Image (cartoon, rainbow, N blue to C red):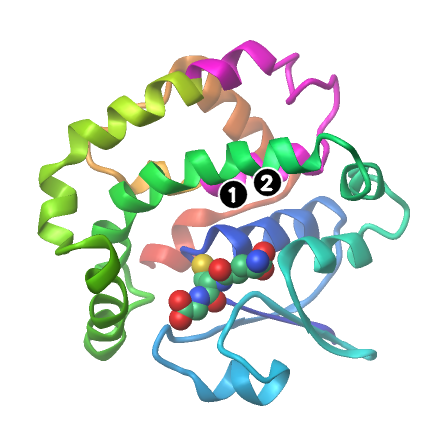
Amino acid sequence: MSALYHFPHCPYCIRVRLALGYLDIPYVSNVISYDDEATPTDLIGKKMLPIWEDSDGAMCESLDIILKLDSENQLATKDFYASADRKGFEDYLDQLGKPIHSLAWPVWIYTKEFSASARDYVLKKKEPKRGPFKNLVARKEDFLKDLAPLLHKLEQELIPFYQSSNLTIKDILLAAHLWGLYVVPEFQFSESIHKYLQKIKKQCLFNYTDELWL
Ligand SMILES: N[C@@H](CCC(=O)N[C@@H](CS)C(=O)NCC(=O)O)C(=O)O
């Protein structure tokens, strides 16, 4: 059977899990430790997840994987892939990702995905660029301030999915990033965004909690 190699916290990996659920494609879930460089390097020649492996071999890049999985264009992946607004949408995702990662990383490293050595590996890799994780926690209000207009903008676009009456790849890309906020202590989504994410969760048969905590 085909297999997904992934990190449970990782937004790019969550994208693929959401698409697999929505498209009802069976697969073997291989959770990789963040400090395991050998497994991804053996498969694709570098340390990057998600990796999808099927009878054609192993491939990376979440959007390329979803394009392949969505062969009947049920998520309108083909339209998005070639669309003129792809760049603008990806820029918006990057803007969302920055504060979300700063808020979520200090919590993610204490989920069951991370052994002590994997946690150490993250800190050694991320702290030189982001600064000490303790400072990220202390700057929580700054990141929430950066997020507020981006989330407000999102609310204006939900009809009830993103600029669409049905779920598309854009909802999967958005939800995969936004999901990280569910682990941030005391953060609360607005009612409309929470309902939006729960609708996606249901349609994509997605379970974020179990692989993170149980
Ligand atoms: N453009 C890639 C990005 C994937 C990516 O950034 N993956 C991160 C995990 S969130 C990774 O593998 N990082 C390896 C590392 O930081 O050591 C995609 O869309 O799949």
Q: Which residue is mark 1?
A: 176
- Quickly name the residue at label 2: 173
Instruction: Indicate left or right for 57 with 111 as reference.
Output: right
Q: 10 Å neighbourhood of mark 1: few (<14), some, or many (≥20)?
A: many
Q: How many marks?
A: 2
Badge 1 amino acid: Ala
Q: Are marks 1 and 2 in contact (CB under 8 Å)?
A: yes
In the rendered image, the vertical position of residue 181 relative to residue 59, given as above or below:
above
Pick the front one: 59 or 28: 59
Q: Quadrant of residue 8?
A: bottom left
- Numbered disc 1: secondary structure: helix
- Quadrant (top left/top right/bottom left/bottom right) for the C terminus: bottom left
Residue 119: within the magenta?
no
What x and y, as percent, mark residue 147?
34, 26
Q: How far is disc 1 from disc 2 in space, using C-alphas? A: 5 Å
- Circle 2 residues within 10 Å: few <14, some 14–19, many ≥20: many
The residue at label 1 has a CB less than 8 Å from ligand 1: no
